Image (spheres, helix red, strand yellow):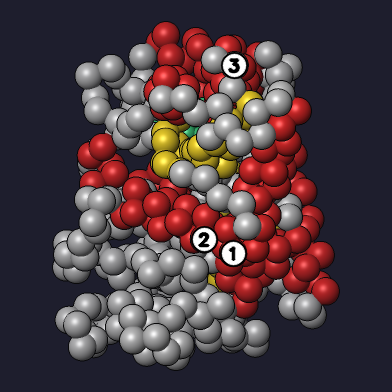
Amino acid sequence: MTRPDPAGGAVLPGTNPVTEAGRMAPKNYDGVLLASFGGPEGQDDVIPFLRNVTRGRGIPDERLEEVSQHYRANGGISPINQQNRELKAALEAELRARGIELPVLWGNRNWDPYIPQTLQDAYDAGHRKLLMVTTSAYSCYSSCRQYREDIGIALTETGLDGRLEVDKVRQYFDHPGFVEPFIEGTAAGLADVRAQLAAAGTPDAPVHILFATHSIPTRDAEAAGRSADEPREFDEGSAYVAQHLATGAAVISRVQAESGLTAPWSLVYQSRSGAPHVPWLEPDINDAIADLAGQGIKGIVIVPLGFVSDHMEVVWDLDTEALETCRNLGLAATRVPTPGTHRKFVNGLVDLISERTLANNISDRPAVTGLGPWYDVCRPGCCANFRGEKPTIAGADTTVGTGHDAYPAAPADAAGREGTP
Ligand SMILES: CC1=C(CCC(=O)O)c2cc3nc(cc4[nH]c(cc5[nH]c(cc1n2)c(C)c5CCC(=O)O)c(CCC(=O)O)c4C)C(CCC(=O)O)=C3C
Ligand SMILES: [Fe+2]
């Protein structure tokens, strides 16, 4: 599924001027690192977990109290850890099925197993070159750079820097493996809401599709995917927003082509935290639902396009809150599944790993939007951390986790972009 170039022909691998920069040559990795957010596994974990997440972030106490109740209502347990155990097992099975001998190690940002311990255990077990896959598909500080920092800081603090190399696969928002489950889910969701409306005697009532993602501070949104030495511009002012809109558009066109079903759609945001005076991306999904109801919309399909699994932000913020908003307004509604351990998603992650390994090199990097395939090696300063610079891996200007010779300065390409060939 190589994307067509503007002239209509297929883009040959390695000749795409936008994406040729930022490619990393394949390596002989000896393990895959599945890196995720982490979550509490019992009532006693809830407050320590929330402290880990929000340290130094200026999240008001009232918001923390509110979020702790989401976890408390679920026995203090986040669904995310079990989902990652299942994803790890599915990745191992698919790698084995393809004859690829790479164990999958698992580490989290905010809860046990913590990333520094996973890296130490990996090193002690003889690993020297890891390829990281995160449970985060888009470009922004929380989804991309913060994982690069998590590894950079862990390598520095454990003293493993220079002894353990860690790279990461590209952000995969527009990889077919991530998008296909949403295409299936959106087609099924549209059919479901149409059936609900038909059962209510209003088969032709207007339906709207809401692509939902995590809100982030607008300042982070503006810095997303933007590099000091490559001022790539995005129509929407933000790579984070642009990536969601382009992926959503790709989902809609495939759903229409394959099922004949469609509806007007928009991108909305959820799970805002932070101080009230700090601007975050809007509109909030609940406000958007109320507006749509006011405009006469009778059915809503919620597509959690920003998320990889049905974790707390999905089961609480969408299934509990947003679906309740729909019910209160008398709207037919459904929430589409996340990729989770869908066979196509697991296959896609293994393809993303394979495109970076020497023995299993796939040189083609498929992408369903014109924004990607995204960079293997992040450009200097992209998704900036406004709290101050930290050691990061997997950047063109990185000095951590590389063996210190893995990112040679690459020649600028025809468009003047720098990167690692
Ligand atoms: C972009 C993004 C994703 C999507 C990409 C990805 O998936 O990585 C995401 C995912 C997640 N966010 C999660 C949980 C939380 N996020 C919080 C707070 C924050 N999220 C932010 C952004 C994102 N978050 C931001 C800018 C903050 C403010 C504090 C800060 O600047 O860091 C807080 C603090 C309380 C609150 O205010 O909500 C919690 C508890 C869980 C775990 C769910 C579970 O346990 O099942 C997951 C997967
Ligand atoms: Fe979050």
Residue drawn at x 25%, y 51% as measured from the top left? 236
Residue wearing tag 1:
257
Q: Amino acid at mark 3?
A: Gly
Measure how far apart labels 2 and 3 are at the Cα level: 28 Å
Disc 3 residue: CB within 8 Å of ligand 1: no
Disc 2: CA contacts within 10 A as few (<14), some (14-19) or many (>=20): some
Residue 344: % across, % down: 70, 63
Residue wearing tag 2:
253
Residue 330's disc number? 3
Residue drawn at x 41%, y 58% as measured from the top left? 246
Q: Is residue 274 left or right of residue 182?
A: left
Q: Is residue 360 above or below residue 104?
A: below
In which quadrant of the rendered view does residue 133 lie?
bottom right
Closer to the chain start, of discs 2 and 3, is 2
Measure how far apart labels 3 and 1 are at the Cα level: 30 Å
Regarding mark 2 in the picture, which secondary structure is present there? helix
Residue drawn at x 66%, y 58% as measured from the top left? 259
Regarding mark 3 in the picture, which secondary structure is present there? loop
Residue 13: % across, % down: 46, 88
Residue 342's disc number? none
Measure how far apart labels 2 and 1 are at the Cα level: 6 Å
